[in-house]
Image (spheres, rainbow, N blue to C red):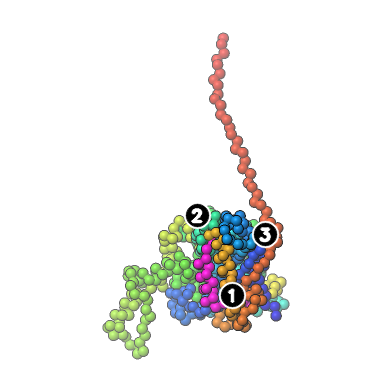
Amino acid sequence: MDIGATLLDDVVSKIAQIPGSRTFTVSVIVSQPRKSPASVFPYAPNVHEAEVYIQDILALVAEDIHVEGMNGVDQESVPGLEMPTREAVYVSAVELVLYTLPKTSSAIVYVSKVDSTGQGKRPSPTKTLVLALLEHITKRWFGANITNDEGKAERSGWNIWVHLFARAQNQYLFPASIEFPGKKVLSDVGLVKWWKGVLDQFTDTISSQSPASIPENRILSYVTVPGLTSLEVNQFLPKRPAGLIGPEWLIGNPYSNTSTLFPMDVRPPCSISQLIPYFPDDPKARLIDEIANTTSKASATIVSEPRRKKRKLDSGEKEMDGQAQGSEAEETTLDFVQTVSAEEFWERMDGRQECRLGTVAFFVVYVDQSASSLGAVAGGKEVKSAKRAEVAPGMMKKISTMLDSADFGTIEKAVRSTKLVQEAIKALAGGSLDITEGIATKAEGRVSEVENLSEETLVKFITRSIQVNNPEPAPKAEVAVPTPVVTVLTARKKKKPTST
């Protein structure tokens, strides 16, 4: 049975289109799903009764580079250093967190971290890597399965929410990489423009792959820059490139759209605790924590105790005086987060120190792939669910910790760090993997478990090298600067009167 392309297949296929003659090693690691109802909406009512699963995804791209002459590291300048002419160094990395909510057939993809070292050739594969991951997850993992001649969806797709916040930092995933002179860090405005370009291509691909399946208003793109007005955002937000299709960007957030069903099975207006996801190292999450833990519903004063569950009486009678006092105190200390509206929340975001002057931008892309919006796919194009390999969360944490303790400040250090991480990834061949197919919830779609992972399975699902031989990118045309015309002013001589 043709199971379709794996995540690694699609990433490698995209990387193979990068210009130039280059050698890459691509690694994609996906953790097994674990139930974590309070991970993304921790303050929602009855959150512990919700069915929420979380998975971590880490993608790394290494490139073979010439060691001599780069950063002053070569065999002659460093005594005792023995290195071949070419070595692999990591050049790009992406970290995602995937949340699945089966009740509403919703998946939230949080782009947690994206980083590059600047130690490879141009163009960098970072943008290609991000696009390949988002497109595969949206279409292969959660898209509709189209298998019959009429092009009808035999399995309706899930609704996808892509979230990220753009904030310029020296480094995210590659420690000390800012010390390498070839790394160029984008400004805040430059990073916003870069992400908009990436998401423009993403929505263009999703729209063009099945134009009949996603009607108008089924893909919505939002950008919010706290501290700036809509007019100010529009001034520096680049226009969509010619030839790309997709929705126009909406300046603001989706949390006032009453026609949209959100992952917690609610529609606005309702509490932010059920609307706004809570992500690691996210400014929105820090504000939600502050609202929940420092403000009370009744008096708007500091609350010293955490929220407690209400007591239920078996008899149904009124509580005694002491119990009544406790109940009143409990009512007083109800988390104010339950009553804060989305509009008030974003007003507070505008005044926060970390979001002032437009230094942080929040992007949300919503793709509705539900049965009601799908209908027939043009041409009856077949879309198949792909198998994937999932490692134990402990193995994922081990590799992430090793990457966090690495050093990419010089080429020499980057080569050594890359080797250590790649060896840890290859060591997965001695462990076990879950090979799954279908939606990543509980054991649904579980196909088999590989006790002793072979090298062949490792290359198929997790890590693979590729040789790229494409034309070199066209050099950027130099803009001719016109020679300024200098007008020389001369003193006007006064005419002498004619003598008579």
Residue position for label 1: 427
Query: Which sits in the foreground, 93 or 40?
Result: 93
Residue 402 falls within the magenta-colored stretch: yes
Q: Earlier in the sequence, mark 3 or mark 2?
A: 3
Residue 445, percent from left and from top: 60, 82
Quick one: 369 or 35, which is closer to the camera?
Answer: 35
Residue type at mark 2: give it: Glu
Furthest-bottom residue in this view: 315
- Tell me the amino acid under the disc marked 3: Pro
Q: Is residue 329 magenta?
A: no
- The number of numbered discs placed on residues in the rendered structure image is 3
SS of the residue at dot 2? Answer: helix
Question: Measured from the top left, where is residue 28 in percent x and y?
Answer: 60, 71
Q: Viewer-nearest of labels 2 and 1?
A: 1
Does the residue at mark 2 contact the one at mark 1 (Cβ under 8 Å)? no
Q: Are marks 3 and 2 in contact (CB under 8 Å)?
A: no
- In which quarter of the view is residue 65 placed? bottom right
Where does label 2 land, which residue?
Answer: 232
Q: Which residue shows up at 51% across the image and 79% down it?
A: 35
Can you tell which mark lies on residue 368? none
Magenta-drawn segment: 383-408
Q: Which residue matches tag 3?
A: 19
Camera-near label (3 vs 2) is 3
Residue drawn at x 63%, y 44% as measured from the top left: 480
Whichever of labels 1 and 3 marks the residue nearer the N terminus, that label is 3
